[in-house]
Amino acid sequence: MKLKQKEQKQVTNITQTVVEAGSHLIQLLRDKNLKDSAYIFSSMIEGYSVVRQVTDNDAVLNSKLENIDSQLYRQMESLSGLLEQGNLMKATEIVQFSFNPTLKKWQNGIQTYYQIEEKTSFTIGVYFHAASPLKAYSEPRVNALVEAAAEQGSTIFFFSSQDVDLENKKIEADIFRDGSWTRDSFDYPDVIHNGFSQNIFNQSRVERKLRREIPFTSFVFGDKLQLPKRIVENRKYAELLIPFTIIQDEQKVIDYIERYQKVVLKPIRGARGENIYFAEKNGEKYRVSQDTNTAILNKEDFIQWLYDTILSKDRDYIVQKYLHVRTKKGEPFDFRIHMQKNGEGKWQITKMYPRTGYKNSNQIKIYQGGPLKDLNSFLEQEFGKDAIAIKEKLMDLALNLTFHIDKLYGLALDEMGLDIAIDENQRMWLFEANMGPQTKAHEKERADNVIAYSRFLAKHRIFHTNQMNERSLLKGFFDAEHSKLPYAENQQQKKIGLLNDKKQLKELRQSLAEEIEGTNSFYFFSPSDIDIDEMQIRGAFYNDGEWEEKITDYPDVLIDCFKTKDNNFLQSIYEEFESIPFINETIDQLREQTQLLTALGNNEEMNNYLPPYQKVTHKKEVIRFLDTEHAITLKKNISNQNEDDYIIHKTGKFDYVVISDEGETNYNQITLTHFIEDRLKENQWFVQKHAEGNDVEIEMIRTNQHEWTTIGDETTVQPVFQSLQETLVSIFGNKISNAQVTLTVTDGKPIITDMTINNLEHLESNQTVVQAIAELASNL
């Protein structure tokens, strides 16, 4: 039975992938890489088996391929035995002279039978997740891509995640047409060029969906730590690496300086040579430099500098042996080699050029414009009669090292920059390999290969992946594809999901299940229950007094009592649910209490009910505020910080009383200053004027757009609450779902002295609260 044209194309694409793998296999065998050879060979057998299942069902095609299939079967059987024995020499001979030529005959036989017309025109989508690539890319890069696409007969447009309509498979994109930029609607492209690639955890939901349907060109290969680690684990080319270690404390740096005299300190996720420092020891002093700036420090000051500059920052650094590489003029230098895959899917050197720095600096200058240094002239100047041999050695190393790194990442890479240095003994070192090399001086040459390689992927429908995009990164998270759990029923009902820690809020989730079930579907889950790859959840459903786990789709409404938004690693969960209405969500612009007070104070009527307040970062700010108001409250500014509030009274010119849960303590100005300093070191704080009077505590839960349920006696402060409810909705819209407010009534005037919003996880789970949440979830 002959296949439909689309299915025929899929089969020919698989044959192309198998043949391409044969080219990689021969190189691996020549490199005596048994492990990767066996892996590639097994993948080829899998691809061949898939095609064979199809061709065996077509009597005519099966007859045409019968002799070729017999040859391939014998060759595969022989190669399997040789690889098991480790006989790579004989395996290389068979692959080169028998197996690969037979594969090409097999491919030609299938293509001739199906008579598939070669597609020559392709659409290429240039993608950046956060915004239009026209904003993220430089103008010369965009223009070069447009020009190269036109020369190679391809349509190219530019888009972001926000431009994609997943349901209708349409993209609103920017295109350069008839001499100007315009917006237009397009079908999905044949291939997507994603210059700023990310691992699976940082990809948007839109990107993960697109990757299943469209080939992408670019994949990440980690930071300054991950790539060297893989090279060391695989041993080959490990001798190119300069010794380094992660900076965990100041002693790591001190030890490295003692061992190597001079070291480099650089961020693991740095780029463009930024935030790199050099340190060395001269006698009892330490010399620290950055660019052309230098400081001489004693050991105590050097350790303090390490803490202030590196250890206290939210950025990981490595310390590395300094490699002394200088030109005859005393300038630091290296070679930048820009590698790309071309229109045949093979690596080539796009540009290779020397880079130098200032004599009085340790760093290479980042390209700022103008012509690049001429490679041949530089080599002749520095190495004389050895120039040609060194150039050939550089080129060979670049091609072989790049192919090796590509193998470490599943042959999925498309571009990288190698920074290679040569010391006084003509030994070559790898300073760095990165996936986004600077190309200001040769954008058109880069663009020619980007378009050609994109067309290659589109033509053969090659879907690459690598370990930075695989499920190995999702270890510990739910894997729906391999789960044996049953699927939930009633998927057509509105699904209300509660995101929370499974050990907490047991009473709330049971009450919500009982209140919601029947009219809607309710389940709870934690972050580890989410399969962001398959976009499904392991939800716990309440049935006959028991919780039962089932596989379910994403919720239609999400009640967030986990608040993972403060965790950068789990930030992707919130991006995953960006189109789902939230109840109790973290509002980004209200992380601090003072931000909430400022938002409320912008409303003239609400401002009348707020006390004077000020964010403080220094002890003098607290003292000055206290001198003005005489009685203040020192409060935590981040609502989830577990610190007491402190009421501070000024009782004399230099006398103070501090009141907390622990009681009252008397201070003079000096001891109070020390007390405030200690508090400010620990957390973020603000001060507000202290109000004496009767406290009224109210809880408010929104049930729809403009209606609220209140818990507490609001009769004495009714005007405030009506104004507050209207103000919260006008400022935050559907983002606001609940608030807990404390008012202090002084001389008949209510003042808001404490307030938290969207803090549902701290409310008592009574019937009124549960009913209000259920009603709001049903109305969203």
Image: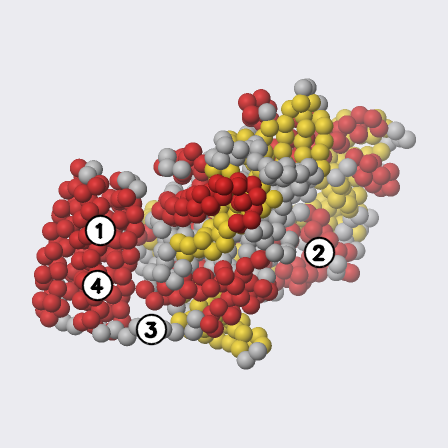
Horizontal placement of 552 versus 593: left or right? left
In the picture of the structure, the residue carrying the numbered disc 2 is 599
As drawn, the label of residue 119 is 3
In the image, 290 versus 487, the foreground residue is 290
Q: Which amino acid does label 2 sit on?
A: Ala
Q: What residue type is labelled 4?
A: Gln
* Numbered label attached to residue 197: none
Foreground: disc 3 or disc 2 = 3
- Answer whether labels 4 and 3 touch (C-beta < 8 Å): no
Cβ–Cβ below 8 Å for labels 3 and 2?
no
Camera-nearest label, 1 or 2: 1
Rendered image: mark on residue 96? 1
Q: How far from the left and from the top, in percent, is residue 327?
A: 59, 39
Query: What residue lies at 54% left-to-right and 30% top-to-bottom?
Result: 321
Residue 753 image offset from top left, x and y in percent: 73, 46
Cα separation, mark 3 vs mark 2, equals 58 Å
Dot 2 alpha-carbon crowd within 10 angstroms: few under 14, some 14 to 19, many 20 or more: some
Image spot of residue 93 (x, y percent): 20, 47
The image quadrant where one finds the N terminus is: bottom left
Mark whose residue sits in front, 3 or 1: 1
The kind of residue on which mark 1 rests is: Gln
- Secondary structure under tag 1 reads helix
| Residue 532 visible | no
Q: Label 1 vs label 2: CA separation? A: 72 Å
In this view of the protein, which residue sits in the foreground, 542 or 336?
336
Disc 3 marks a residue whose amino acid type is Lys
In the image, residue 527 sits, relative to residue 245, either above or below, namely below
Q: Label 3, label 1: how many angstroms apart (C-alpha)?
A: 30 Å
Mark sitting earlier along the chain (3/2): 3
Among the two numbered marks 4 and 2 on one chain, the one whose residue lies closer to the N terminus: 4
